Amino acid sequence: MHINHIACWMNDLDRLSDFYCRFFDAEIQPLYENPNRKYSSRFLVFPGGSRLELMHIPGLKDQIPDQRVGLAHIAFSTGSKEAVDQLTARLKQEGYTLLDGPRLTGDGYYESAFLDPDGNRVEITV
């Protein structure tokens, strides 16, 4: 048994696809569209096989409170502290919102946290 994929609602599929491709080496899969529902989605495949489904419906309310029941964040493992530092610096330099870190957490993770272009929390870990 394994998780097949994680799905998230997004405001702009192309913008988020480009973001995860550019910074996390995602392979962008073909766009799926259902014109009757005004629904579109696209899978992103990351090195190692993890998949993220980006979904969009026009007019979806953009209300993401600080804390809620449900998906809290997505975490990407870079393989080293140096890679965490480098990617964090790159994202910060390009204007993405850094929330925390890089730092060693109380439970032993070395990580940083920031927001993707749609405000989803993303963690970068070793």
Image: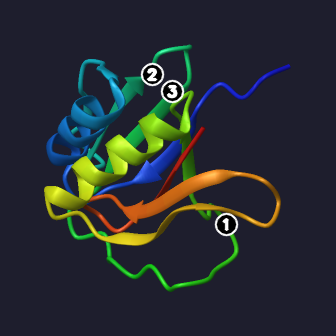
- Circle nearer the viewer, 2 or 1: 2
User: Do tag 2 and tag 1 residues touch (Cβ < 8 Å)?
Assistant: no
- In x, y percent, where is residue 57? 28, 56
- Say above or below: 29 vs 65: above
Residue at 71% across, 63% down: 105
Instruction: Name the image quarter holding residue 64.
Output: bottom left
Mark 2 → mark 3, Cα distance in angstroms: 6 Å
Count neighbours of disc 2 (C-alpha within 10 A) and say few if under 14, some if 14 to 19, many if 20 or more: some
Query: What element does badge 2 sit on?
Result: loop
- In x, y percent, where is residue 50? 56, 24
Q: Quadrant of the C terminus?
A: top right
- Identify residue for label 2: 46
Q: Earlier in the sequence, mark 2 or mark 3?
A: 2
- Identify residue for label 1: 70
User: In this rendering, does residue 3 appear at all?
Assistant: yes
Query: What element does badge 3 sit on?
Result: strand
Going by the numbered disc 2, the residue's amino acid type is Phe
Instruction: Name the image quarter holding residue 115.
Output: bottom left
- Say above or below: 95 vs 2: below
User: Do tag 2 and tag 3 residues touch (Cβ < 8 Å)?
Assistant: yes
Mark 2 → mark 1, Cα distance in angstroms: 22 Å
Question: Is residue 67 toward the left or the right of residue 105 in the image?
Answer: left
Question: Is residue 34 toward the left or the right of residue 120 in the image?
Answer: left
- Circle nearer the viewer, 2 or 3: 2
Question: Is residue 115 toward the left or the right of residue 34 in the image?
Answer: right
- Identify residue for label 3: 51
Q: Which mark is residue 6?
A: none
User: In this rendering, does residue 38 appear at all?
Assistant: no
Between residues 109 and 118, which one lies in front from this camera angle? 109
Residue at 15% across, 41% down: 14
Going by the numbered disc 3, the residue's amino acid type is Arg
Mark 3 → mark 1, Cα distance in angstroms: 18 Å
